[in-house]
Amino acid sequence: VPLLQAAGKKKSFNLLGLAEAELEEQFVRGDGPGGQATNKTNNCVVLKHIPSGIVVKCHQTRSVEQNRKKAREILQEKVDLFYKGEDSDVFKERRASEKKKQEKKRRAKENLERKKYLKEMQQLD
C-alpha cells in the first residue's frame, strides 16, 4: 500500500495501459470547500479498476471532463505501481526526488554548521 502513495506526482510515459472495459466510472457530488457550487453538482469522478480493486476519486477542477482525464492519469499510475512495484517508473521517480531532498537537507545542515564555526572563530578574535 505505501507504493500507491507515490502515484499522481509526476508524469511517466512507460505505464501500463488501461482498458475502458476494466473501468467502472461514477459521477458523485464533491466534498470540501466551495459551498453551493460543490454541493449541487456531480462533477467529482470516482474510477474503479475492477481487476485490481483500486479506486480513485478526483475532484480537482469544476469540469467533469478534466476530472475524468486526471482521474484516469492517476489511476494509470496507481495500477502501474500495483503491478510493477519497485520496478515502476513512478516509484523510481519518487525515490529519486526523495534522495534529492535528503541531499539538499544535508548540504543545508553542513552550511549551517560552517556558519556557526565561523561565528565562533570571529568571536574568539
Image (cartoon, rainbow, N blue to C red):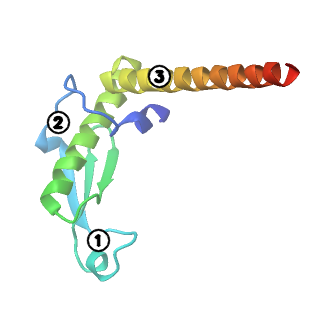
> Mark 3 vs mark 1: which is more N-terminal?
1
In the picture of the structure, the residue carrying the numbered disc 2 is 18
Please tell me whether mark 3 sits on a helix, a strand or a loop. helix
Answer few, some or many: residues within 10 Å of disc 2's Cα (few below 14, many 20 plus, some between 14 and 19): some
Q: Which mark is residue 115?
A: none
The picture quadrant where one finds residue 15 is top left
Callout 2–callout 1 Cβ contact below 8 Å: no
**Residue at point 65%, 19% (across, down):** 110
Query: What whole-number distance in Å separates the C-alpha atoms at marks 3 and 1?
Result: 39 Å
In the picture of the structure, the residue carrying the numbered disc 3 is 100
**Residue at point 29%, 55% (across, down):** 58
> Mark 2 vs mark 1: which is more N-terminal?
2
Q: Is 83 positioned to the left or the right of 121 in the image?
A: left
Query: What whole-number distance in Å separates the C-alpha atoms at marks 2 and 1?
Result: 25 Å
Q: Is 6 positioned to the left or the right of 59 in the image?
A: right
Rendering coords of residue 44 (x, y %): 26, 63
Quadrant where the image shows the C terminus: top right
Foreground: 40 or 120?
120
Please tell me whether mark 2 sits on a helix, a strand or a loop. loop
Callout 3–callout 1 Cβ contact below 8 Å: no
Rendering coords of residue 97 (x, y %): 43, 26
106 is higher (above) or lower (below) than 42: above
Q: Farthest residue to the front: give it.
A: 125
Rendering coords of residue 83 (x, y %): 33, 26
Q: Is 9 positioned to the left or the right of 125 in the image?
A: left
Q: Which mark is residue 29?
A: 1
Q: Is 78 positioned to the left or the right of 15 in the image?
A: right
Mark 3: which amino acid?
Lys
Mark 2: which amino acid?
Leu
